[in-house]
Amino acid sequence: MGEGLSDLPRPQPLGVFPLPAGYLLIPASDDPAVDEARTTMLAGRLPTTWPDALAAHRLAHAGDLDGALAAVGDDGAGTFNRYVIDPTGVDRAALRASLPAGLAPLVDVVAYACGLSDVPPGEGEATGEVLALVRAARATSLLEAGDATGAVGVLNDAAEAAEPVSVPLAAILLGNAAVIAHDHSLPDADPVNELGAVLKVLEDADLPVARAELHLQRGLCLHELAAAGRRPLTDAVDEYYSALQLVGQASAPHVWASANLNLGTAYLTMPMVEASDQLRAGIAMQALRASLEVFTQEDFPQEWASAQMNLANALVYTPSTHQGDNIVEAVERYEEVLELRQRQGDPLGRARILANQGNALAHLGVFDHAKSKLHEARFLFEEQGDVDAVMAVRGVLDEIARQVVPGSQGPKFGVPQGEEVELVRELREQGVES
């Protein structure tokens, strides 16, 4: 057994912070500052002052893995910590044999998490936080095998093992379970309340990315309930803003972009009834443009298409002193998404884009091109049996017909106004994507 491991203090703050820093063992020490740091980390917070004995931990949490590797000690805990930072080329069987029985499964937990092993770890003699991580790995295996119900059950068991010794770890595990239950529409799932309870536990934790992810997931759940008329959409908006207050593009690009995309989408689906609502539309466009800094067509085609479509809709339907330029930009963005939708074989998605693009072209006065787009959209909607969309497209075609009849007194295309807003709102809602 490695020197210094027999009296290793427990519980350890394992799994509270992300791998690799969050899986480093804190060695036994006569320095009370080391034990104080362990207690602080168990509560989900990082020490304001790191003791010298935890220099490797400080560097790892700062993202300096090379520096952390160089600072790792030569005792038993150091041997394991070196493996956590750089697990390649390590004799895992020998390392496992050097650890106390209650810690040995950690070797397999790390190997599984890093993709060095396809076999989830066994529980062995693990207890507390170690047992929780073993079960969490097994839940991942079950989820990958398509057993979402089993994964949620095992995560709940993992949280039960963690709760007496590491409340933040238990909360994180319960949050993961709530997200899986929601994503797979499991019966009796209550993700809004469950995620709310988890966030309350973690509100003082130094876990900005994890908390932002949870706020985003709760926002998505509330967004769905708002679409069904069961919660106000502003509840979802509040969660997206909470996520954006915790992370930025540099620290968590995907979470940041997703929160911006969904914030913009939420704002666009709110009715515009007052002049002050234009400010909200401006925020929506700003958020959607921000999301496109991360969601490129090459790397995230679905998210890119959604952001492009929603931004184009906002450009068309938001009054502006540069409305003509905005509509031209919208037509171009619709065209870019059309190329993707054509390749993907998505007739309804293509029809929505064509309908919105045709309406935008009509506002520019390019009636022949607008009619071509709208006729194709109507055909696709009819083919798919979407009667409401067919009627909305016919309405725009009727407006175009009135415009081209000499002496017509019909409403002019331009910035949608009055009754015309009601006519095109259906098209806008058809095009808003979440």
Image (tube, rainbow, N blue to C red):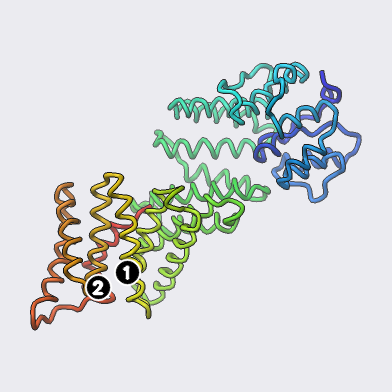
Work out whether 143 lies above or below 230: above
Left or right for 22, reference 426: right
Left or right for 226, reference 165: left
x, y percent for residue 399 = 15, 71
Q: Circle 1: is it few (<14), some (14-19), or many (20+) Cα within 10 Å?
A: many
Q: Earlier in the sequence, mark 1 or mark 2?
A: 1
Left or right for 65, reference 390: right
Q: Quadrant of residue 52?
A: top right
| x 38%, y 63%: residue | 311
Q: Circle 2: is it few (<14), some (14-19), or many (20+) Cα within 10 Å?
A: many
Q: Quadrant of the N terminus?
A: top right
Residue with the mark numbered 1 = 316
| x 11%, y 71%: residue | 401
Identity, as a three-letter code, of the amino acid under mark 2: His
Label 2 SS: helix
Cβ–Cβ under 8 Å for marks 1 and 2: yes
Task: Return the residue nearer the eye: 354 or 417.
Answer: 354
Label 1 SS: helix
Which residue is farthest right? 30
Q: Which mark is residue 83?
A: none
x, y percent for residue 81 = 76, 31
Work out whether 391 lies above or below 65: below
x, y percent for residue 31 = 90, 38
| x 8%, y 83%: residue | 407
Residue with the mark numbered 2 = 363
x, y percent for residue 60 = 74, 42
